[in-house]
Image: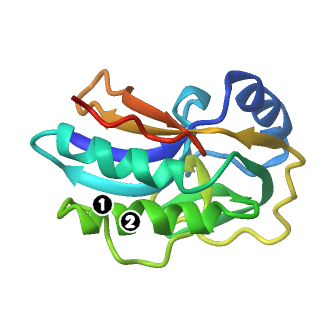
Amino acid sequence: MRLFVALVPPPAVRTRLACALPALPVGPQFRPVAPDRWHVTLAFLGEVPDDEPLRAPLAAAAAGGGPLALSVTGAATFPSALYVGVEGPGLADLAARVREELLAAGQPAGDRRRWRGHLTIARGRAVRVVPGLPRVPVAWRADRVSLVHSLVGPEGGYEELAGWVLGAVPVPSA
């Protein structure tokens, strides 16, 4: 299974963000990412044979801090994507905690590249930085970490396998 750990904005936030995006330069060189796929990746785990061993460390990571006040910053680009930045107190700490808990449990924890909070809104080849991309005034309260299965194939899509409330004390399994 191809898995990642993420914060998924609620539908109302995705709607507000989608309404704020028409000013962004999404053209033929970009393929838009559907709003129902927008998320902030905390850790991309790649191909994992079994999600069960990931659950306890992810519960511990979520328990280590409370809900987050997040806001969307201006748009920018990676080499092959257009994104809006996401920031807020504790967000980078949560991403680091997810990685640390997974590694401590001997589980995959994603790559070691510098982590940056963002929502990918379009993909493309050889995307160049576009000057003057606007700030997108959208904010929300993130209160849940999700373990997500990325379904590969023509249909694609995402399926949440499990989720944990930020700040909740994990209940040991029997």
Residue 138 position, x and y percent, is 85, 43
Q: Which mark is residue 99?
A: 2
- Residue, x 54% and y 68% (percent of image)? 78
Residue 158 position, x and y percent, is 39, 29
Q: As shown in the figure, which amino acid type bears the numbered disc 2?
A: Arg
- Residue, x 60% and y 68% (percent of image)? 92
The image quarter containing residue 18 is top right
| Drawn side of residue 118 relative to residue 169, left or right | right
Front-lying residue, 76 or 131 = 76
Residue 61 position, x and y percent, is 45, 54
- Residue, x 66% and y 49% (percent of image)? 66
Q: Residue 102 carries which label?
A: 1
Residue 47 position, x and y percent, is 17, 49
Residue sitting farthest toward the left: 49
Above or below for 105 versus 46: below
The coloring applied to the image is: rainbow
Front-lying residue, 135 or 128 = 135
Is residue 130 among the parts visible in the rendering?
yes
| Drawn side of residue 151 relative to residue 127, left or right | left
Q: As shown in the figure, which amino acid type bears the numbered disc 1?
A: Leu
- Residue, x 61% and y 30% (percent of image)? 35
Q: Is mark 1 on a helix, strand or loop?
A: helix
Q: Quadrant of the N terminus?
A: top left
